[in-house]
Image (cartoon, coloured by chain):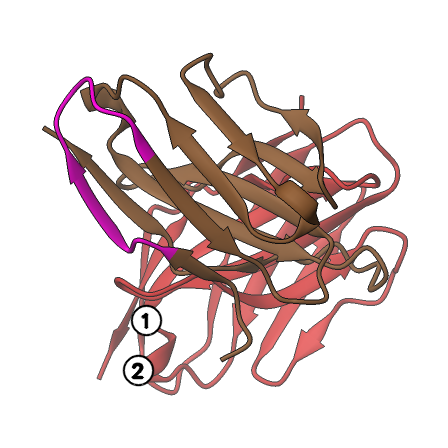
């Protein structure tokens, strides 16, 4: 399977704990995006990487959130001191700058539940 | 800021019939891209169709086609010969000429009646 993969698929944590999610993009894609999707809503953009550089961050990405993409390959999204309002599906997507079409390919998501 | 509006929270159609899902958007940019994504229950988001704003011709992918009205900022999706497997949430999405993140609508839940 050469699609976007995300781990873990599900995460249950207690309020105040830190969590980290991983995303592996399609291998030839140099752009990687993180989104958050709550129940009954469309995904909301969080942040974007081109290669290893984080080029854009949404105002939704509070100081408790941090994302990295070392070496321009996989990416991690960490949430510190989780709150119940962080419960959501976290989606990762990738795209190719060379393809020029702007379409993004999504992974299956990580569902976070904060108790 | 760009916004995407899907005014139909839910649509229902008989199998083999045709259904149209509506989407409007607001932008001040001249170069942008529009997409329809499908999200089946508990499954990942799949790209259905895309439209470049500079292209006047409406995009078509098999049973899926769009009606892109640039002046009206409207981008509707037509699904012909609906199949049970088409049942899903459908999201309209926008991105500008740069490598921006996608802006999504709230989605339309499509039900296919056998």
The answer to the question of whether label 2 and label 1 lie on touching residues, with beta carbons closer than 8 A, is yes
Q: Which chain is red?
A: B
Residue at image location 81% in from the left, 55% down from the top: A97
Circle 1 packing at 10 Å, graded few (<14), some (14-19), many (20+), is some
Q: Are marks 2 and 1 on the same chain?
A: yes
Image x and y of residue A27, in percent: 65, 67
- Along the line of sight, the residue nearer the viewer: A59 or B28: A59
Give the distance between the C-alpha atoms of the residues marked 2 and 1, in whole angstroms: 6 Å
- Along the line of sight, the residue nearer the viewer: B2 or A2: A2
Residue numbers of the magenta segment: A7-19
Q: Which residue is mark 1?
A: B87
- Along the line of sight, the residue nearer the viewer: B100 or B107: B100
Q: Which chain is brown?
A: A
Residue at image location 54% in from the left, 16% down from the top: A59
- In which image quadrant can residue B112 be found? bottom left
Circle 2 packing at 10 Å, graded few (<14), some (14-19), many (20+), is few
- Is residue B73 visible in the rendered image? The answer is no
Q: Chain of mark 2?
A: B
Task: Please give the label number shown on residue B84.
Answer: 2
């Amino acid at each position: 399977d050469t699609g976007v993969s995300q781990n873990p698929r599900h995460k249950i944590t207690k309020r105040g704990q830190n969590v980290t999610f991983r995303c592996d993009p399609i291998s030839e894609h140099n752009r990687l995006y993180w989104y958050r999707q709550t129940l009954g809503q469309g995904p909301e953009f969080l942040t974007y990487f081109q290669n290893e550089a984080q080029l854009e961050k949404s105002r939704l990405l509070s100081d408790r959130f941090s994302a990295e993409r070392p070496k321009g390959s996989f990416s991690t999204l960490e949430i510190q001191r989780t709150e119940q309002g962080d419960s959501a599906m976290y989606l990762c997507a990738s795209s190719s700058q060379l393809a020029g079409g702007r379409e993004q390919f999504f992974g299956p998501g990580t569902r976070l539940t904060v108790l | 800021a760009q916004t995407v509006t899907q005014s139909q929270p839910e649509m229902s159609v008989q199998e083999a019939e045709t259904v149209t899902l509506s989407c409007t958007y607001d932008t001040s940019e001249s170069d942008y891209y529009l997409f329809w994504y499908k999200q089946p229950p508990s499954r990942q988001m799949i790209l259905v169709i895309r439209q470049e704003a500079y292209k006047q011709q409406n995009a078509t992918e098999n049973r899926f086609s769009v009606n892109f009205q640039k002046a009206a900022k409207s981008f509707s999706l037509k699904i012909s010969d609906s199949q049970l497997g088409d049942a899903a949430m459908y999201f309209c999405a926008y991105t500008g000429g740069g490598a921006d993140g996608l802006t999504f609508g709230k989605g339309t839940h499509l039900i296919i009646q056998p």
